[in-house]
């Protein structure tokens, strides 16, 4: 049966609220949670971008059963992979083994800030592959030295490790990255209901591994209010990954999405109070073969009403529909 998760969105939510939102999600009965890891918000109107790893440490203490996960961390520019391994292991310990490290090749939006430039997708995937190997080796607790095309590690070792190694999920958007996820990851992460991506992952050896998707929704008792909010805060997503991965600043996303209308974004983000609309959108993921689906409520101020509605209405409807 599909598991349904809660998304803590650092780009739209004050940092203290992220922790209380995760507590509420646990109480509402979500099966797991994921958290974005950004330096910038996508749009200026979103207005936040706290440090995800500090929030994860707080959430590990403030929750008790809810699995935690990054969706996703880029371990190749802002963060060196040896540092990502240390952070992930620490959260794994603090959470009592409830943490999964979601990794991806990143976006220019967040990674350009350290002044290293933004290379081609081929180079980004090479860097990601090296980073995963470094992180895996450090999770063994052994001394690690590594000399690759993109990274150097000299006699690194982690001393605080959870009882079992932190699982690694890998974000994929095409055949090459799906194969990387199957070869080096414990699960697949994707943002759209792409059945061909699942097929590529399965054929590369990932058939028995979890597949995580993410669905942005905009619940509000007033459908018109939901559509307006989705357009204001989530229009950046409509141009798709080729644009999302390349633009460098929130104002770039503002400019690239300024022409998008409410009716356009409503095709991507189900809006309003009708659970059938959201169940239909979720079914596209389950039909494609996703085993886990993280729900993302657009709008920080609406998280409380969303989790209450999810507990009473949406989660039962989703589970009744498989």
Image (tube, rainbow, N blue to C red):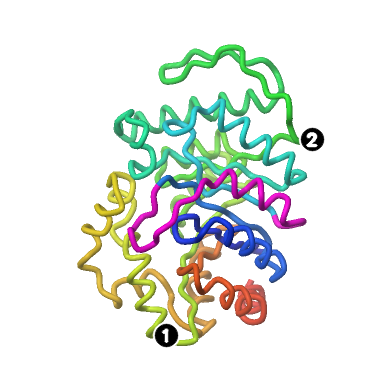
Give the residue number, with chain letter if any, for mark 1. Answer: 223
Q: Secondary structure at mark 1?
A: helix
The mark found on residue 163 in the picture is 2
x then y, percent, for residue 37: 49, 47
The reply to whether the magenta stretch includes residue 47 is yes
Q: Nearer the viewer, residue 202 or 241?
A: 241
The reply to whether the magenta stretch includes residue 1 is no
Residue 28 position by quadrant: bottom right
Q: Is residue 313 above or below residue 140?
A: below
Of marks 1 and 2, which one's residue comes earlier in the chain? 2
Q: Is residue 101 above or below residue 277?
A: above
Q: Secondary structure at mark 2?
A: loop
Picture residue at 49% right of the left edge, 55% below the top: 10
Do we see residue 293 in this rendering?
no
Q: Nearer the viewer, residue 194 or 224?
A: 224
Picture residue at 52% right of the left edge, 57% below the top: 213
x then y, percent, for residue 274: 50, 85
* Distance of label 1 from label 2 (alpha carbons): 47 Å
Q: Residues within 10 Å of mark 1 (few under 14, many from 20)?
A: some
x then y, percent, for residue 145: 58, 13
Picture residue at 50% right of the left edge, 76% below the top: 278
Q: Quadrant of the N terminus?
A: bottom right
Picture residue at 70% right of the left edge, 49% below the top: 60
Q: Which residues are magenta?
A: 40-66
């Amino acid at each position: 049966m599909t598991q349904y998760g809660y998304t803590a969105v650092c780009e739209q939510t004050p940092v203290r609220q992220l922790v209380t939102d995760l507590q509420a999600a646990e109480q509402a009965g979500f099966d797991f949670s994921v958290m974005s890891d950004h330096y910038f918000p996508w749009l200026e109107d979103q207005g936040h971008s706290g440090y995800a790893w500090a929030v994860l440490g707080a959430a590990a203490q403030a929750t008790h059963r809810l699995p935690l996960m990054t969706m996703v961390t880029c371990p190749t520019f802002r963060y060196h992979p040896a540092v990502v391994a240390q952070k992930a292991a620490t959260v794994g310990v603090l959470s009592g083994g409830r943490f999964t490290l979601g990794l991806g090749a990143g976006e220019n939006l967040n990674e350009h800030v350290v002044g290293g430039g933004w290379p081609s997708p081929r180079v980004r995937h090479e860097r990601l592959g090296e980073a995963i190997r470094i992180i895996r080796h450090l999770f063994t607790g052994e001394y690690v030295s590594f000399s690759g095309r993109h990274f150097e590690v000299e006699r690194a070792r982690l001393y605080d490790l959870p009882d079992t190694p932190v699982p690694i999920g890998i974000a994929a958007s095409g055949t090459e990255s799906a194969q990387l996820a199957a070869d080096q990851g414990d699960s697949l992460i994707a943002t759209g209901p792409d059945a061909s991506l699942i097929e590529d992952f399965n054929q590369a050896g990932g058939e028995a591994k979890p597949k995580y998707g993410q669905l942005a929704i905009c619940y509000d008792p007033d459908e018109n209010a939901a559509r307006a909010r989705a357009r204001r805060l989530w229009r950046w997503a409509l141009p798709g990954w080729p644009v999302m991965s390349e633009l460098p600043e929130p104002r770039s996303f503002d400019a690239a999405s300024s022409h998008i209308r409410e009716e356009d974004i409503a095709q991507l983000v189900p809006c309003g109070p009708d659970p059938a609309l959201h169940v239909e959108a979720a079914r596209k993921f389950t039909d494609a073969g996703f085993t886990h689906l993280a729900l993302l409520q657009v709008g920080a101020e609406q998280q409380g009403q969303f989790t209450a509605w999810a507990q009473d209405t949406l989660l039962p409807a989703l589970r009744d529909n498989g």
